[in-house]
Amino acid sequence: MLEAGKKAPAFSLPDQDGHIHKLSDYKGQWVLIYFYPKDDTPGCTKEACGIRDNFPAFTKMNAVALGVSKDSPEKHQKFIQKYDLPFTLLADEKTTMIEQYGAWKEKSMYGKTFMGIQRLSYLVDPTGKVAKVYPNVKPTEHAQEVLRDLKDLA
């Protein structure tokens, strides 16, 4: 996991339309980078819709949201269309960024262990440094929590 105050690692990933996004594209803006396990699952949908519902407030605070999962650009596109999501979803099918940001973890379910994406977020400041780490994201409360922090930090 990254630490607050450290420079956020550079990345280069395709979005839902195949366009490449880099952290440097967002210099001068606050960036919420949130990692989530899978498109169109209950917790991930609640988290994405919470950000969607609060997106005008993010925009007013010069902040963007980037969701990151292993899902393909095509799956991201369907997820965005189904829930009318107004922000970018990045496809990290090789888990390069997911691992670099410390979101690739051993998980267990029904007695089996496997590697998967931890629900984890970072708020990156306009200079590219990690301003806040969210290691224990609650999907329904996350957007409001980030907005409170943006008010305090901006």
Image: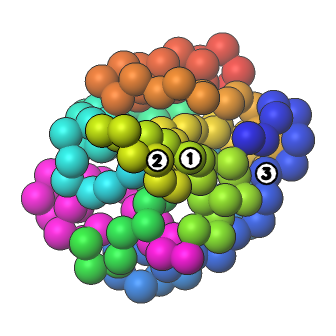
> Mark 3 — residue?
8
Q: Nearer the viewer, mark 1 or mark 2?
A: 2
Magenta segment: 76-94
Of the image marks 1 and 2, the number of the one nearer the N terminus? 1
Q: Is residue 95 left or right of residue 139?
A: right
- Labels 2 & 3 near each other (Cβ < 8 A): no
Q: Residue at point 59% right, 53% down? A: 104
Q: Residue 116 or 53: which is nearer the viewer?
A: 116
**Residue bearing mark 1:** 106
10 horizontally vs 143: left or right = right
Quadrant including the C terminus: top right
Amino acid at the residue labelled 3? Ala
What residue is pinned by disc 2? 113
Mark positioned earlier in the residue sequence (1 or 3): 3
Identified by mark 2, the residue type is Thr
Q: Earlier in the sequence, mark 2 or mark 3?
A: 3
